Each structure stands twice: as structure tokens, then as C-alpha cells.
Amino acid sequence: MNASSTTPSVTEVAQKQMKHTCEHHAECMKIIQAILDDEASEAEKDHFRENMDKCIPCIESYRLEKCIKDSLNNKIVKKPCPESILNTIISKINS
Amino acid sequence: MLVAMSETLTTNEYTDDLRYEVFNREFMPHIDSMYNFAFRLTMDEDDANDLVQDTYLKAFRFISSFEQGTNAKAWLFRILKNSFINDYRKKSKEPSKVDYQEVETTYNSEEASDTTYTVDLRADAVQELIGDEVANALNALPVDFRTVIILCDIEGFTYEEMAKILDIPIGTVRSRLHRARNLLKEKLRSYASSMGYDS
């Protein structure tokens, strides 16, 4: 009735199936970026869904790419346009 | 609403009132993004000021070629990018053309497909970087690579919009963006390791 103690747990099975190297990583990098940019084709999305939970290099790359993209978007200070430029533009188009 | 309006306009003829109305409603809301784009291209406040002014004055002058209901921000960015190439890039101190070709050649070679970029930069290390460090890494890229990252990751344009802004095919947008990100990772890695975040 009970699984024997030698039966590997679900997480152990999962870990055993995890890939530690990716044989097509350069291609995967392009797909990962397309996914993050919301520009992936259906075929790329399928590839991503099938591979992303079992390939450690791809999981780490996804985290890194996402982190860089988020940093660019959130951390870099956006300056307001100086008022003087605005005023010059308005006065020039009105003249 | 905007789409419906553009459908009712069979020609692009603008009355004077409409010119001002479209300018204020469609163009002015993007002035901060335009200023930041100009500054990141020229890396100089005075040049950025001139570039934004020139772009908005051109946009007003050629407003009849703007089709209402289409993406005003992409239209403006394209004018700014063209003005930058024609009027500012020449006098810029940055030897961007040379750099660009060199880099493009390097990254077209076989080495470009290996995975060495990612192995020694970790997401945790990037997370520790402050905005100035990320900005400096971005600013250290040759201008063509900097541009695609700004358009995609900071301004959120689609590949199709980027292709129109830059006058290049979508495939080139993709590959240039890919190379730009590899370069950026190298710059970020050197910041991360100088901060001791890399281990």
C-alpha cells in the first residue's frame, strides 16, 4: 500500500530529469528574449513551455534576462523634459 | 475612438486648428520620452535640447504626413532618430561607426553563438546594481546597440515599431537586440565584479 522508502520522491525525480547543460542554448537565448519581449511565435512558445521547467541553464538565463530587462525599465532615472524646451517649442509653433 | 476618427478623414488635410489640436493631443504627451531618448543618444544636455526642439518643430511642419490613429510616439521617435543621424552624429565625439562595425563583425562570428556571456553573470548580481550602474553600462554600448535596447526595454516598442523607427527589417531588429544584450551583459558583469557581487 505504501510506497517503499526506496521510491524516490517527486522532487528527486524532478531533479534527476533536470538538464544541467543545454545543447541548443544559443537558440534558446533568442527564444527567451522573444518571450520576454512578448514577440515569440507559437512554435517558440511551445518550445519554451516544453523546455523551461527542466533545463537549468535556460531557467537561469530566463531569470537573468528578465532581471536585466526589469532593471533597465525600473532603475534608470527618467528625467522630465526641461520647461525651457517646452516653452521654446510652443512659442516657435505659435509664431 | 482614434481609429474611427482616422477612418472618417479620407485625406490628411489638416486645418490650422486641427494641426494644433493633434500636436497637443498626440505629440506633446511624449515629450519626456523624447527628451530621454535624445539625451541617451547624444549623451549631452545641450544637444539633447536642440534635438528635441528640432524634432518637434519638424513634426509640426510635416504634421500632414502623420496619419491620425497611428502610433504618434513611433512616428516622433523615427523623426528624432533620423535627425540624430543626419545632424548630430557627425559632430559627435563618439567613434560609433567604427565601434559598431567592429562589434558587428565580432558578434557575427562563430564565437557569438557560444554561451560564455551568461555563465558568470547572475540575476542576483544584477539585482544589486543601482540605476546609475545600469545606465552607465547601457551608455557604454555603441549607439546602434544602445538604441535598440532603449526602444525595446525602456520605451516598450514592439519589434515591428522598432523596424519602422530604424528603417531595418524585423529580423535585423531581433539579431541586433540579441547582440546588444550580450554586450550589455558583459558591461554589467564588469560592474558586478567591481562591486564584488559576482561570487
Image (cartoon, coloured by chain):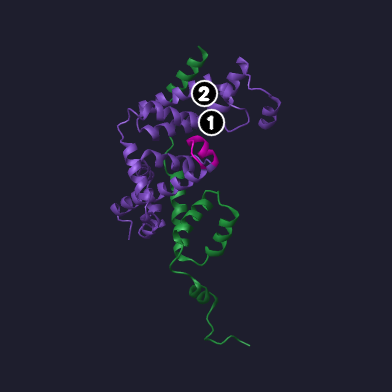
Q: Quadrant of the C terminus of chain B?
A: bottom left
Which mark is on residue A57?
none
Q: Is residue B54 above or below residue A31?
A: above
Question: What residue sits right under mark 2 in the picture?
Answer: B59
Q: Is residue B167 magenta?
A: yes
Q: Nearer the viewer, residue B64 or B128?
A: B64
State the hue of chain B: purple
Numbered range of the magenta stretch: B160-169
Where is residue B4, by image quadrant? top right
Q: Chain of mark 1?
A: B
Q: Which chain is green?
A: A
* Side of A63 where B135 appears, left or right: left
A79 vs B186: above or below: above
Which of these two is toward me, A23 or B146?
A: A23
The residue to which callout 1 is attached is B75
Whole-percent x, y for residue B75 in the image: 53, 31
| Residue at the (44%, 34%) spot, across then down | B37
Examine the residues drawn in magenta and state their main secondary structure.
Answer: helix
Question: How far from the left and from the top, in percent, is residue A54?
Answer: 51, 67
- Does dot 2 land on a helix, a strand or a loop? helix
